Each structure stands twice: as C-alpha cells, then as structure tokens.
Image: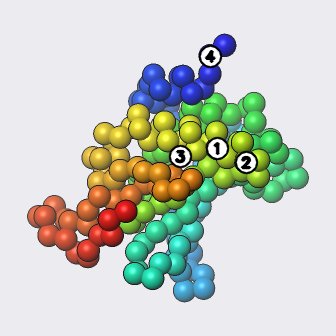
C-alpha cells in the first residue's frame, strides 16, 4: 500500500500540474481589517481560499489561511468527511495549486506570517493535514526561501514566516519579530 506521506517525501510536487496557474486575490475590508479571498475549480469542484487577519499587539501582518470545498449541503467546508470533492479531486494537484497561490499572495502582499495549519472538525484529520502540509513545505523549502519565507511549527500550528523585511537594497522597512 502506497501512503500519501511516502509520496510527498519523495517528490517536491514540481512535476504535478496545478489546477490553476494564477489566482487573483480579492480584498475586502471588514471591521477595520483587510481579508483576502481567491478561488479556483478542481475537477468541477469549487475551492475557496481565504486569508483572515490576526490582530497583533505589535502591528504584525499575520493571517490565518483556510481553503474550503463544497460539502453535501451546498456550503463551503474545510471538513474532509463532509466534502463532496472527496474522491473526485486529485489531492496532490490541489495542494500544489494552494501552495502556488500562497506563494503568489506572499509575493504580492508580503505578510509577516501565515498560519497554514490543517483545519478539520476531526482532530485526527487535522493532525494528518498538518503532517502533509509540513512535508509539502519541507520539500519546497527552496521555493519558499527564494520568496523570502521559511516554515516552522509553533505549538501545534504550522506557519509560513517572512525571514526579513529588507528590500532589494538590503534596507529594512520595519523590524521583524523573531519567532
């Protein structure tokens, strides 16, 4: 039996074709904060990606990332068990697309950090998602570093964190909080 974890540790997903090659991030201002949303279709299943800001005392630009698919009741859900996309969508292509979309967001908006932890109503499924996402980030560490980011675990949360706020000249615009 081939396990997804074994596959992910052997490849960087460079040869996996994403469902979308460009995702347009739309912003929405609500309660004094800017939220971002984008989406794409995977095998006819709508996938929505959302970045919600986290209020921090020191003004950091941190976000929580969630991607959802449609559930049996016609609503967007992050639960694996209720998703109608389950069994119809190529998970490697989905992860590749989401990863590329996150890198695009980082290039466009330069957030300080993004919580990319796997969300799920089922605790075991959430932990499994975290392991898959962590493996994906490890295997794509070079792409992340090229974009100026690294990944790390903080508690049971998986984060993409900006390494520096320096521009191309090496001048930093604001101090970076060291995790």
Instruction: Kindly report the distance in space between the C-alpha atoms of the residues bearing marks 3 and 2.
Output: 22 Å
Q: Position of residue 113 (x, y in %)?
A: 42, 63
The residue positioned 81% from the left and 49% from the top of the image is 71
Q: Which tag, 3 or 2, sits closer to the chain's start?
A: 3
Q: Which residue is mark 3?
A: 98
Closer to us: mark 3 or mark 4? 4
**Crowd around label 4: few <14 · some 14–19 · many ≥20 (10 Å):** few
Instruction: Kindly report the distance in space between the C-alpha atoms of the residues bearing marks 1 and 2.
Output: 6 Å
Q: Which residue is mark 1?
A: 127
* Quadrant (top left/top right/bottom left/bottom right) for the C terminus: bottom left
Q: Are marks 3 and 4 in contact (CB under 8 Å)?
A: no
Q: Which tag, 3 or 1, sits closer to the chain's start?
A: 3
Q: Which mark is residue 123?
A: 2
Q: Position of residue 130 (x, y in %)?
A: 58, 44
The residue positioned 51% from the left and 52% from the top of the image is 158
Q: Which tag, 4 or 2, sits closer to the chain's start?
A: 4
Q: Position of residue 138 (x, y in %)?
A: 41, 38
Q: Which tag, 1 or 4, sits closer to the chain's start?
A: 4
Of residue 26 and residue 96, the one placed in the foreground of this image is 96
Instruction: Kindly report the distance in space between the C-alpha atoms of the residues bearing marks 4 and 2.
Output: 23 Å
Closer to us: mark 3 or mark 1? 1
């Amino acid at each position: 039996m081939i396990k997804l974890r074994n596959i992910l540790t052997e490849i960087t997903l460079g040869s996996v074709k994403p469902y979308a090659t460009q995702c347009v991030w739309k912003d929405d201002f609500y309660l004094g904060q800017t939220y971002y949303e984008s989406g794409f279709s995977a095998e006819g299943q709508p996938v929505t990606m959302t970045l919600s800001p986290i209020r921090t005392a020191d003004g950091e630009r941190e976000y929580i990332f969630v991607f959802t698919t449609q559930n049996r009741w016609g609503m967007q859900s992050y639960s694996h068990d209720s998703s109608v996309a389950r069994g119809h969508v190529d998970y490697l292509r989905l992860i590749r697309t989401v990863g590329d979309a996150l890198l695009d967001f980082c290039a466009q908006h330069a957030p300080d950090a993004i919580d990319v932890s796997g969300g799920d109503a089922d605790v075991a499924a959430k932990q499994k998602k975290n392991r898959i996402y962590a493996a994906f980030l490890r295997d794509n560490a070079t792409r992340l570093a090229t974009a100026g980011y690294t990944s790390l675990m903080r508690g049971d949360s998986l984060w993409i964190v900006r390494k520096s706020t320096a521009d191309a000249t090496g001048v930093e615009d604001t101090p970076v909080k060291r995790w």
